[in-house]
Amino acid sequence: MGTVLQRLQRLLDRPGPLGDLLGRLEARTGVQRLYLATGSVAFLGLYLVFGYGASLLCNLIGFVYPAYVSIKAIESSSKEDDTTWLTYWVVYGIFSVAEFFSDTFLYWFPFYYAGKCLFLVWCMAPVSWNGSQVLYQNIIRPWFLKHHQTVDNVLGDLSAKALDTASSITREVLQTLVSSRARLTAEVAPQLSLSPPEQP
């Protein structure tokens, strides 16, 4: 147990946004950052179980920090952090689609949002057993490698059909406009003849 506490303490002491925030709070309140962090996590967990707006809070946790770090990764010269956060967003996207269909049933469970939040934190955690890496390497990537050719063919067919449909609709609209213009011209032209105005 001592090693877990020591690792947690090292994590909280590490320079960065979390360490800096906890350092400022510790200086102001006089409460150790370990207690501040565990109290905040406990409050957050209880709020996710019992609080109003738990869905919004959970989605913010899963979106705001990863979006911020993704922007930093884009701006950095390293490709490794880009791959890490692209992997997170692939997992997040698949999870969001799956959740859309199952959310109606799952949100009735009292610990659903706490579990979802833990899942998202695990997916973005800076550890070797990061959830997005584990899920991508063991589930998503093998499925993708097995089926990507079929998906590409289906998408190509859909793209060609959509282009054909858009072309035919555009052709029909243009033909309708031309015929309407011709009909309007035929109806209005006699009325616009250049006969001199009648004198009273």
Image (cartoon, grey):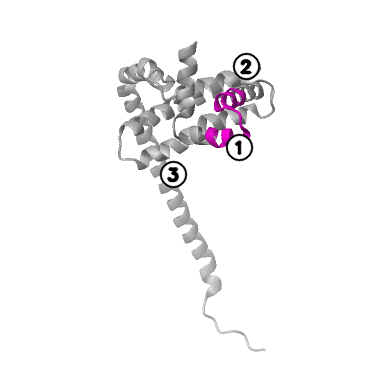
Distance between mark 3 and mark 1 Cα atoms = 67 Å
How would you rate the neighbour count of disc 3 (Cα within 10 Å): few for under 14, some for 14-19, many for 20 or more? few
Q: Label 2: state its secondary structure.
A: loop
List x then y, in percent, for residue 133: 38, 21
List x then y, in percent, for residue 56: 61, 31
| Mark closest to the chain's N terminus, 2 or 3 | 2
Tell me what residue is drawn at x 55 percent, y 28 percent: 33
**Amino acid at pointer 1:** Arg
User: Which residues make up the magenta segment?
Assistant: 22-40
Give the number of the disc on residue 28.
1
Q: Which residue is identified by label 2?
A: 111
Side of 112 where 144 appears, left or right: left
Side of 195 where 165 appears, left or right: left
List x then y, in percent, for residue 1: 50, 10
Tell me what residue is drawn at x 49 percent, y 27 percent: 12
Q: Main secondary structure of the magenta part?
A: helix
Tell me what residue is drawn at x 59 percent, y 24 percent: 35
Q: Marks 2 and 1: in contact by CB < 8 Å?
A: no
Along the viewing direction, whichever of 160 and 99 lies nearer the viewer = 99
**Amino acid at pointer 3:** Ile
